[in-house]
Image (cartoon, grey):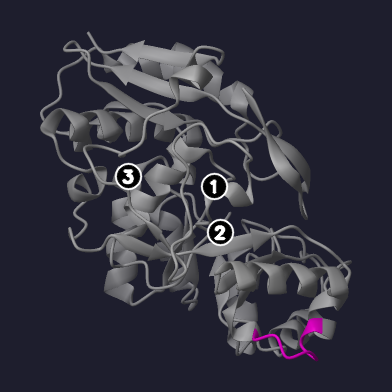
């Protein structure tokens, strides 16, 4: 299904005007459903997978693996290990399975993931579409601040970052602003990125291409501003690579990009062991994907504000009960079993859905 965004969202990868999404429903023999969504985009500009490739892998390679008995939801990752790569496809199955298991046991998904019960509110962070006009950027930042947001991410690229240099000469506090380059500074001189860091921003995320670990490590040695990795992180081994090169990155963890919760928890454990900062990422998910991210983001290891905004920042009407911004600038984790969210039946009646029955 296509959900129109309230306004076009521009990044270094292109302009997105709608979110095409497929929901995945896993249904157990006793009729309990677990939900997830495919987070991939229509094109491979962010990640090698697309919606189409995920559907192909799910139908022909992952679904046939599910006809076995499980004693724990943590077993499903090893069951699907024969399918190499394709993290977003595997995540859509694994995360739906975790939701199903939690609902069956009558516990929240967060509880199943080992999150303390009292960690119910997650600081909200909001992503801004890329612009090269400082006045436009400042106006949007000011508006979002007045609406209650306190942490922001601005998309940047070499051709638009003049707006950041100009913004640094205003009174807006840049220490609550993350710059997300989506690898657009590949080949750019490091001196320029050093000057960008000197503006006082909180973090520069993924300035270089996703496999340029050496370049990121060299850059991190020169920057006072922390360097974050996003697209570079597809599994825990990528964390180890960065560490071996002498880098201590702030990690943007998107559970759908690393294959689901089992790998996410490995990454969390490694980051805690190494003292690395963690933030949750987002893929313009609907309420189902957002509920999954909120559950994981309530883990205490996430010590940096991530990309969790209220539903009404992106969509006029979400697929689920919307997530709202609390007065203290946080998003409340849903209560109840599993995700604490289900799709609106009105949406389901008119939308494609992968209904995978575990027999």
Residue placed under numbered mark 2 in the picture: 230
Q: Secondary structure at mark 1?
A: helix
Q: Is residue 245 left or right of residue 213?
A: left
Q: Position of residue 58 (x, y in %)?
A: 46, 19
Q: Position of residue 104 (x, y in %)?
A: 16, 28
Residue 4 occupies quadrant: top right
The residues colored magenta run: 167-173
Looking at the image, which residue sits at the far top?
A: 359
For image coordinates 25% across by 28% down, the residue present is: 100
Residue placed under numbered mark 3 in the picture: 261
How far apart marks 1 and 3 lie (CA) works out to 23 Å
The mark nearer the N terminus, 3 or 2, is: 2
Whether 137 is drawn above or below 237: the answer is below
Q: Which mark is residue 247?
A: none
Residue placed under numbered mark 1 in the picture: 311
Q: Are marks 1 and 3 in contact (CB under 8 Å)?
A: no
For image coordinates 76% across by 64% down, the residue present is: 186
The mark nearer the N terminus, 1 or 3, is: 3
Give neighbour class at mark 1: few <14, some 14-19, many 20+ (Cα, 10 Å): many
The dominant secondary structure in magenta is loop
Q: Position of residue 93 (x, y in %)?
A: 37, 27
């Amino acid at each position: 299904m296509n959900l129109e965004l309230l306004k076009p969202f521009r990044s270094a990868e292109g302009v997105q005007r709608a979110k095409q999404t497929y929901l995945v429903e896993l249904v157990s023999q006793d009729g309990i459903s677990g939900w997830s969504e495919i987070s991939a985009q229509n094109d491979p500009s962010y990640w090698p997978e697309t919606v189409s490739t995920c559907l192909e892998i799910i139908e022909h390679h992952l679904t046939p693996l599910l006809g076995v008995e499980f004693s724990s939801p943590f077993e499903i990752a090893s069951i699907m290990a024969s399918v190499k790569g394709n993290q977003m496809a595997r995540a859509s199955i694994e995360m739906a399975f975790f939701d199903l298991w939690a609902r069956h046991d009558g516990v929240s998904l967060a509880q199943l993931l080992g999150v303390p019960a009292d960690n119910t509110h997650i600081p909200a962070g909001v992503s801004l579409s890329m612009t090269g006009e400082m006045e436009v950027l400042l106006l949007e930042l000011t508006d979002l601040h007045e609406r209650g947001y306190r942490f922001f991410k601005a998309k940047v690229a070499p051709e638009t970052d003049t707006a950041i240099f100009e913004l640094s000469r205003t009174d807006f506090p840049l220490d609550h602003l993350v710059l997300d380059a989506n690898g657009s500074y590949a080949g750019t001189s490091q001196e320029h990125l050093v000057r960008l860091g000197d503006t006082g921003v909180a973090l520069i995320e993924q300035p270089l291409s996703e496999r340029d670990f050496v370049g990121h490590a060299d850059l991190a040695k020169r920057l006072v501003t922390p360097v974050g990795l996003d697209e570079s992180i597809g599994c825990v081994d990528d964390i180890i690579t960065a560490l071996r090169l002498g880098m201590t990155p702030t990690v943007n963890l998107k559970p759908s990009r690393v294959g689901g919760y089992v790998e996410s928890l490995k990454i969390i454990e490694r980051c805690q062991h190494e003292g690395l900062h963690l933030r949750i990422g987002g893929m313009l998910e609907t309420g189902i994907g957002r509920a999954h991210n909120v559950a994981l983001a309530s883990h205490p290891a996430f010590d940096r504000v991530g990309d969790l905004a209220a539903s009404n920042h992106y969509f006029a009407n979400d697929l689920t009960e919307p997530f709202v911004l609390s007065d203290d600038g946080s998003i409340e984790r849903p209560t109840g079993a599993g995700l604490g969210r289900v799709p609106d039946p009105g949406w389901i009646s008119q939308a494609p859905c992968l209904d995978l029955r575990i027999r």
